[in-house]
Image: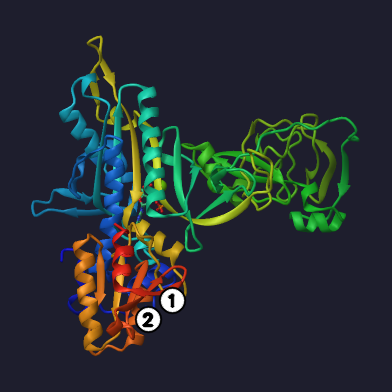
Amino acid sequence: MAHVQRMSTTLLKTLRDDPADAETASHKLLVRAGYVRRTSAGVWTWLPLGKKVLDNVSRVVREEMDAIGGQEVLLPALLPKEPYEASGRWEEYGDLLFRLKDRKGAEYLLGPTHEEIFTLTVKDQCTSYKDLPVILYQVQTKYRDEARPRSGVLRGREFQMKDSYSFDTTDEGLAESYRLHRQAYTRIFERLGLDYRVVSAVSGAMGGSASEEFLAPAAAGEDTFVDCPQCDYAANTEAVTVSVSPADPAGHGPVEELDTPDTPTIETLAAHLGVPASATLKNLLVKVDGEITVVGVPGNREVDLGKLGEHLAPAVVELVTAEDFVGRPDLVRGYVGPQGLGLRYIADPRVAPGTAWITGANKSGKHARNVVCGRDFEVDQYLDVVVVEPGDPCPACGAGLEIGRAIEIGHIFQLGRKYADAFNLDVLGQNGKPVRVTMGSYGIGVSRAVAALAEQTHDEAGLCWPREVAPADVHIVAAGKAVQTELALELADKLGSAGVRVLVDDRNGVSPGVKFTDAELIGVPTILVVGRGAPQGVVELKDRRTGTREELPVAEAIERLSALR
Ligand code: ATP
Ligand code: MG
């Protein structure tokens, strides 16, 4: 009986209507099918069916983490402030951190991720190179005071994460731990039945080298990524870079000044001259650590300030304001050109040496034509800083890129020695001298993966789980008459003892129509209907995903379903 769950006694109330505040399919369906209930903004209760799915995801994650030699631990969620002060993240996290005080006034936080505490754990436990490498992981509740906790369990303020951390004495060791994680993640997401892409991510403020994200394509996702339809290239939109390919500088005439009154924008300029925006050079003024810097991109492209910031970090990038033009006759607003300007010039690779542009002449109402890169102005630094657009060339094969939305389900990251430095994490090396440890950190959104699966697999009728994560293997629907319920329970028993996970709808006084609708909504992969044929020992098997139905004798149904385990 261990595997049989009766609906008559299960805490489960399905809803016909979508919750008023729900925008995404997973949010609507997980609530309507009775998997989760909202407790407060971004904080969720997992009801019996939901808990089963969540546990199934965790089980797969644990099995694959164990398979690469990970050791499971469980760290507290309630953490002292000091280690996070030492790493700088008490401040850096800003409003994202849940902070609290105990009765004595000592400050604590609710852990958003645990690099600090794992580093201290290893510092406490490992003293020699012989104790390493080590991979530690936990499946644990995390807390982040997200600005917009929307989309149900997709973005919670309390959520389940598998986080792991690797500790090595060498860079090669770290690369190997990273490779092992990448392999484990690939297996995990494949077993879960998620459609996913691995994309190179921008390392961002964490500092470090290699970093990749696992993205599940879905309209409800908050991440955008580029995908090549021709080859297997995929990347975070902010990580796409094109290279500089110099053009032939010959054949361009001399610089020619043009009278272009009232053309301070690319649109007005292109219209005035009757040229496409792509023939013009857009020069954006920014301040990099307070120093006025010009960023040049083709006139038909937008500067991605996030990308620019990532490239120039830790320098701070700001837009210029009206005050920055005060007392600067050299800066003619709306008519800036790179030629003879004497400011640091950062350019997009499309502004390649040898290309000619129409650009500001640094005089009010004037532009210049035939301004050639490398001849009339120099680029100090090339950075790919434009917003990626569909059709941009794939950096790997040149085909036109597509842009899609996705959910970040995992992130692997070579941290390097940042935390080891903050906490002086050394072990004794082979030669008896201390060696600084190098680390990786790796996360999977366990609760988010449940929502991502719901997003990718649902249909109009409801959820539609892959078997590995489904709350049961088979959902038996007893149509309603006593003889049908009796046979349904008998079947449930037999299947249960064969190790098949069964959900059986034995509710009295619920119409067959409602039961069928609920079965579709709940989304167990196989539905077994005990209906009209029951007295003759005939039942109906239905595949939830394909909708294929088949009538067959009870014995055959049992045989078929037992093979599922
Ligand atoms: P996001 O960009 O979506 O806010 P993140 O990059 O801040 O995520 P990480 O710090 O990389 O997240 O955390 C590891 C994993 O934890 C993420 O890949 C994601 O799957 C999951 N995760 C992060 N924040 C949340 C959240 N608020 N709710 C549910 N899962 C989350
Ligand atoms: Mg991330």
Amino acid type shown at disc 2: Thr
- The label number, if any, that marks residue 221 in the structure image: none
Relative vertical location of residue 34 with respect to residue 501 in this rendering, above or below: below
The disc, 1 or 2, on the residue closer to the chain's N-terminal end is: 1
Quarter of the picture containing the C terminus is: bottom left
Q: Can residue 270 be seen from the camera position used here?
A: yes
Judging from the image, what secondary structure is the residue with disc 1 in?
loop
**Residue at horizontal 19 percent and vertical 54 percent from the top:** 100
Residue 340, position as x, y percentages in the image: 75, 33
Outermost left residue: 104
Residue 343, position as x, y percentages in the image: 66, 34
**Residue at horizontal 30 percent and vertical 72 percent from the top:** 475
The answer to which image quadrant residue 468 occupies is: bottom left
Task: Give the camera-side residue of 72 and 534.
Answer: 534
Judging from the image, what secondary structure is the residue with disc 2 in?
helix
Relative vertical location of residue 190 with respect to residue 508 in this rendering, above or below: above
Relative vertical location of residue 55 with respect to residue 248 in this rendering, above or below: below
Labels 1 and 2 touching (C-beta < 8 A): yes
Residue 251, position as x, y percentages in the image: 90, 33
Q: Can residue 326 be seen from the camera position used here?
A: no
Task: Give the camera-side residue of 342 and 239.
Answer: 239
State how far apart marks 1 and 2 are (Cα).
8 Å
- Bin the neighbour count of mark 1 within 10 Å (Cα to Cα): few under 14, some 14-19, many 20 and up: some
Q: Badge 1 is on which residue?
A: 461
Q: Badge 2 is on which residue?
A: 517
Amino acid type shown at disc 1: Ala
Quarter of the picture containing the N terminus is: bottom left
